Image (cartoon, rainbow, N blue to C red):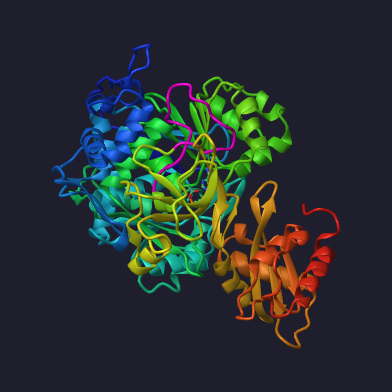
Amino acid sequence: MMCSLWRGSLLTLTSSLNRRVFQCCRQLGRSYNIASCMPEAVAFQGVSDHSGLYKFSVNESDRFWGAVARQRLSWISPFHTVQNCDFSQGKIKWFEGGKLNVSVNCLDRHVQTCPERVALIWERDEPGTEVKITYRQLLELTCRLGNLLKRQGVRRGDCVTIYMPPCPLAVASMLACARIGAAHNVVFAGFSSEALADRIRDAQSSTVITVNQGVRGGKVVDLKRTVDQAVQNCPSVQQVLVAMRTENTVAMTDRDVPLEEEMMKEDVVCEPVAMDSEDVLFLLYTSGSTGKPKGLVHTQAGYLLYTSLTHRYVFNYHDGDVFGCVADIGWITGHSYIVYGPLCNGGTTVLFESTPVYPNPGRYWEMVERLGINQFYGAPTAIRLLLKYGDEWVQNYNRSSLKTLGSVGEPINTEAWEWYHRVVGDGRCPVVDTWWQTETGGICIAPRPSDPEAEIVPGMAMRPFYGIKPALLDTEGEVLSSNDSTGALCISQAWPGMARTIHNHHQRFTETYFHPYPGFFFTGDGAHRSKEGYYQIVGRLDDVINVSGHRLGTAELEDVVNQCPGVAESAAIGYSHDIKGEGVYVFVVLKKAVMVEEDVLAQQLREMVSRSIAKYACPDFIQVVRCLPKTRSGKIMRRVLRKVVERNTDELGDLSTLDDPDSVHEVISGHRRLCGDGKQQ
Ligand code: 6R9
């Protein structure tokens, strides 16, 4: 299904550079010494074990991050200040004065030492058709694309929107932006044309890069058509670069540029721009508790350093390992652990185009065997799904290459964790439940790194990473200093990977993350700290639903539902779902005198939601009610609705503030009618 030009362009871009053996600095000592934790730590006086190193990283944060940044990144000019941060203003600056180029750090320096090492393994939808791209080839692709973008008028500081499935040209597009000093805005290729248009407009992109069609789970998706619809409402867009993922031609207009054809005309050398540490590297939109997704901004040096360090130490990634993160590049997990972390470390990283069940539920493990994957990083929702298909799909394949298993995106329940550990990892691979967010840039809490062989408790993220100082705060804003307590998860000092602002909305940035608990970065999650001092994430405290690891704001969804003809108002609630983690339940109040069959309404609503947001946002249940339970001041009592949906009606709590207490009984009986008397799901 691959266009010959596509394959040709990847394979013919070869030149002969001398290969040099890449020496890694693996520590061979048997006894536990600090260098086995982190070679850089040898320079930190008085540090002799993991807990000493952790303490040093938070207490002497300038020295820690300064040393690591000098050693791990290639600088064009050195930085003069390690950090310059003030949470009260939402000011976060790292490595000021420094200049570097992210694409040079991810490509050129590895091409110098090991040009023929595989950088990307593109695991295409059809099993057994993977394409390998070496560092030398990826640099050439990136340079040609960088030159093409410049020819098309893209300048330093512009923002290019990328709407592509995981593929080498998507990675090269991201790196080409970095090379020429443009920011990228990758939009998950499952988003609808309206969601894409919103993001293009907010980012003010004049250039969009896409593919003619995507291929996923054996199905062809017309991505270019979605872009065509989106750009109709995006006056800023002047050109759309179209790569050919399939051989099917698509209608091209004057605005469209055939990507492979034009990039083949470009030179394979493209001078990297010297970027300031705090120049923008990318925007990435994510849902929050208002109707409008926010474009979080990440910058150059701090982000790159943080992703590379976490990739190296959370997963114990070593030179020569094959790293398999099965996320989509459209999410932060793909940015940090498919692209920037692994490539900065000179790693070999897998780009997974398919689904966990295509062509059958053995897909992941067949791929692990065929590609020799050493670290596998996936989402609990997929693990829960595969668990239901039974152990045989796993045991049919040789998984002896696996060394570390990772989980991300949502809480992993004990059953799924145990299965992942026992069946997938044969009980021999550490499972790292990694907690982090688009806002944090990289992993903040995970069982590793730690002392060698330190215990891992199932379903717990456990230990803060170097430089991360978590705090739990109660509703009064007091810090909970003892163990065995639960509160709002905050982080009390800056780290290099954190987001710098919300694109064009710095005030929203400070209000969302720094005002709720002055002096702290507020994550939006709740967490428990065990008696032993380990962290366990409880879930979101704000109005964000986590569907299969995808963030969805209830306000964002309600905005769409409320636009449906006949709908007066609505309330979207997340409820626990045994595979997706959370499902979406929507209560709808119809306008007076509107009569509509509930099935018809439900279908209309689902269509609207997939058109306006994405398929994953479609409600599982839609219940029509006469009115919503509200406080006298008019606030919807979501807590009450959630209890109804979760069948905890004995614990409805104080209803005395309700405007119309009868509405709750109506909601309960309507819910029973819709879902039956049995337990949900
Ligand atoms: C990386 C990513 C972030 C939200 C986060 C939290 C949830 C992520 C988790 C987890 C429990 C984990 N989350 N990892 N909850 N355990 N290991 O997923 O980023 O898409 O921004 O979502 O996901 O609620 O706040 P993002």
Which quarter of the rendering shows the N terminus? top right
Q: Tell me which residue sits at (62%, 41%) in the image.
A: 382
Residue 339 lies, in percent from the top left, at 39, 42
Residue 180, visible in the rendered structure: yes
**Closer to us: 5 or 353:** 353
Left or right: residue 485 versus residue 359 is left
Q: Tell me which residue sits at (44%, 49%) in the image.
A: 332
State which quadrant residue 33 falls in. Answer: top left
Furthest residue in direction bottom, as rendered: 593
State which quadrant residue 6 falls in. Answer: top left
Residue 569 lies, in percent from the top left, at 65, 78
Furthest residue in direction top, as rendered: 30
In magenta segment, residue 107: no
Which contiguous range is marked in magenta? 441-463
Residue 105 lies, in percent from the top left, at 26, 39
**Closer to us: 522 or 543:** 522
**Closer to us: 315 or 514:** 514
Residue 608 lies, in percent from the top left, at 62, 70
Left or right: residue 318 versus residue 556 is left
State which quadrant residue 358 falls in. Answer: top right
In magenta segment, residue 458: yes
Compared to 113, does 357 lie above or below?
below
